[in-house]
Amino acid sequence: MRIFICACGNALHFENSVCLGCGHEVGWCPACRTISALIPETDTNHRCGNPQCGAQLRKCHNYHAEGVCNRCLTADTPATQESALCDCCVYNETIPDLSVDGNREKWARLEAAKRRLFYELDNLRLPHGTAAEGFDPPLSFDFKADVIPANEFWRTMDNAERVYTGHDSGKITINIREADDAEREKLRVDLDEGHRTLVGHFRHEIGHYYWDLLVRGRREQDSIALFGDHGNPTYAEALERHYAEGPPPDWSQRFISAYASMHPWEDFAESFAAYLAQCAVLDTASAVGVSSAPNLATADFDTRIERHREIGIAMNEMNRTMGLLDFLPELFVPPVIAKLRFIDDLVRQLPTVPQA
């Protein structure tokens, strides 16, 4: 991720919808892929303030009507297309109940993390699409809250009333309590995780989507050789065993995280999330001028692994200096590197994606 520049010369960041220097509205222009000032042209149309672009734009519906997005569409996008939603918001099937206090703020945090995910996917040219575009499986998102029965706060909720963050046939569901910093930190500590972040959830769950899209029926045997047999034990059996017994004592010598040891599908998703995070770190480091950062598009896998390790060591010490969590808590042992290499190969040699 790079830092963008407003027409006034002030720095703009990926989440900005207003320039804090000049107070001008800004947004993501899909034509030049920058956060730029939005120059009003009509009541609904704007011009991209990037002097090298100048594209005619319209705000995403969730930008101008809901205040949870900062992306635009080109002005020639049909107004009837999904209520003129941007290329991120169009994937939403369920949004939080906005009549509940605090849910709009949580939704905005979820959307900010999702936009970062899509920026990373597009940087790597990873395919994704909706059912309307013929993708099989189609990608979609549900942002939901647990159901708390009115006047029955004492009662333990059953499984039908709980929302579990996860993935099923292209649908990614996120429990919106993950957008509550205090709740998320409590879960991180309870589960003994190095990190627990919104963008981390999106990276993990999209890993399940790409197993279905790029591995299933294509490279399953290669996947089994590295991650294990996803059919034996079954996912349900592995889940029950993991929560009854915990990870194996030597998990850190074979897996990127304790949770990855639960089942081969979770190992792939955790590894995929680590791969996306690594690419994002190297992309940002290169954009902000870190001297050791390689070019993400041209550097070979081993160079990227080594530079990521070097940056991680330096950033860990920076964070410890400030009393923060380690920037890079994972250990990249040889079995983990082999799994990341497999994922890199998937990304670099993308097949024609399956469509319905």
Image (cartoon, rainbow, N blue to C red):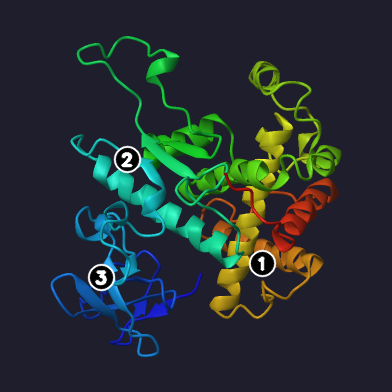
The one of 58 and 333 positioned closer to us in this rendering? 58
Residue to which mark 1 is pinned: 311
Residue pointed to by mark 3: 18
Report crowding for label 3: few under 14, some 14 to 19, many 20 or more residues within 10 A (C-alpha).
some
Q: Hey, what amino acid is under mark 2?
A: Ile
Give how far apart the Cα atoms at labels 3 and 1 are. 31 Å
Q: Is residue 120 above or below residue 202?
A: below
**Numbered marks: total:** 3
Question: In the orientation shown, which residue stands out farthest toward the front?
Answer: 356
* Residue 218 seen in the figure: yes
Taking the image as shown, residue 137 lies to the left or right of residue 155, namely: right
- Which of the marked residues, 3 or 1, is nearer the chain's N terminus? 3
Q: Residues within 10 Å of mark 1 (few under 14, many from 20)?
A: some
Q: Nearer the viewer, residue 64 or 165?
A: 64
Per the image, label 3 sits on a secondary structure element best described as loop
Residue 104 at what x, y percent from top left?
25, 45
SS category of the residue bearing label 1 = helix
Q: Quick one: label 2, few (<14), some, or many (20+) residues within 10 Å?
A: some
